[in-house]
Each structure stands twice: as structure tokens, then as C-alpha cells.
Image (cartoon, rainbow, N blue to C red):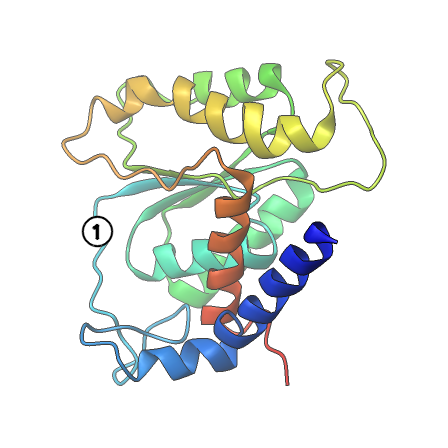
Amino acid sequence: MGQIFTTTQFYLHGKKHSTATGYLKHTLSYTSPFQLSPIATPIDNDQVDLTGKSIIITGGNSGIGLTLATYCASKNAYVELFCRNEERAAKAVSQITSLTSNPNISYTVCDVSLKSSIDAAISSRPTDSPLHAVVCNAGVLLNDRQESSEGNELTLASHLVFGSYYLSKVSERAFWKTSTLAMGVTNDLVIRLFFKFHLACTWGVLDRP
């Protein structure tokens, strides 16, 4: 009974506050600049400038990851997508570049459920390449237990162990080379999902009537 109550409460709160409609309602009380679209316009601009900042976004070829990557690119950041599928990654890079006219968009093939894949992806980056943020967006949520080729349960491996904690850990050497440390990383699945849901609603990805 307690689980049913908690789930219902969670759903109703999210429906009221975390849909696009809820977000727009809350913006009425905002005092600092914000924008509703991933790409700023003269009348819709949060005044953020990411020029010179280097950002890795996992799962950046679709959904919220793609939207966030487009936003960062439109703010003049260097954006590197970590994606499992090379064809979809290349398509996303082309799309982002076309929308933002930012040529500094790249991708690296990486399966965040695999320790070996993360090691290879991070090792492929130049040792003197700066890194200002890692956004751990990729992950899977499966109904049935499935294991990766390394023998780890996929949801746990992709969301938490390797996709968040380990990736942020092995990225440390790059962070220490930068004067600004801004990690879009959390190891709590619930907080991660809240963050993803908020972004989706901010930019209308999960609008509801």
C-alpha cells in the first residue's frame, strides 16, 4: 500500500510541476534570464555563453541528450557525443552542426555499460585536451534482467556504476587541467531521472495536455 501511495504521489507531483505546462507556469516567477528553446532567439535567450568550454554528453544522439547537445552547441561549446551507435552519432553531429553552425561537434563510439568501452573512449582523447563538464545521460531501463558482455546487469551498469560513477572518475585527469570544474553528474538514479524529466519538460519533449 505504501508503495502505491508513494508512486501516485510522485506521478501527481510530476504531472503538476514537471511537464512543459508546469514549467511555463513556474517561469512566471523567474527573475534571471531563461529560454524555452534549445536554440536561442533575440527574444528567447538565457544569455549563457559556453565559448571555450568542452563538454561530453553521453547518449547525445537522441532525445534529451540530443536536445542538450544542441543547446550547448548553440552556446558555442565544444561538444563531444559519447554514443553506442556510430551511424546515429554521425547523423546527430550533422544535425547539430546544421542547426547551430557550430563546427566543433564530434562523437566517440562508447557503450557506457562497458568499462572497457569507457576506458577506450577516454584514452582516445588527447591528454592535453581540456574538459569542463560530463553529462551522464545515457542508460537503459529494462523490465527483465539482462547482462552486458562483461557480465554486469545492464541497467545498473549503464545508469550508475559505469555510465555515471566510473566515467566521471576516469575523466578526472582532464578536469584537473581546466580552471573550471562543472560536472553534470550524479550517481543517484532518482535524481538523474528528475533532471532528465525537467529538461524534457523545459524544452517540450514530454509535453502533456
At which x and y percent is residue 185? 41, 37
Query: Image point 14% across, 31% down: which residue?
Result: 179
The answer to which quarter of the image holds residue 157 is top right
Vertical placement of residue 204 versus 148, above or below: below
- How many numbered circles does the render carry? 1
Vertical placement of residue 160 versus 83, above or below: above
The answer to whether residue 112 is left or right of residue 191 is right
Query: Image point 44% across, 53% down: which residue?
Result: 69
Tell me the quadrant of the picture where the C terminus can be found. bottom right
* Foreground pick, 204 / 195: 195
Q: Is residue 111 visible?
A: no
At which x and y percent is residue 21? 50, 82
Query: Image point 55% across, 50% down: which residue?
Result: 193
| Residue at which label 1 appears | 51
The answer to which quarter of the image holds residue 110 is top right
The answer to whether residue 100 is left or right of residue 110 is left
Vertical placement of residue 66 versus 183, above or below: below
Please name the amino acid that badge 1 sits on.
Answer: Thr
The answer to whether residue 197 is left or right of residue 24 is right
At which x and y percent is residue 119? 52, 16
Q: Is residue 159 visible?
A: yes
At which x and y percent is residue 192? 50, 45
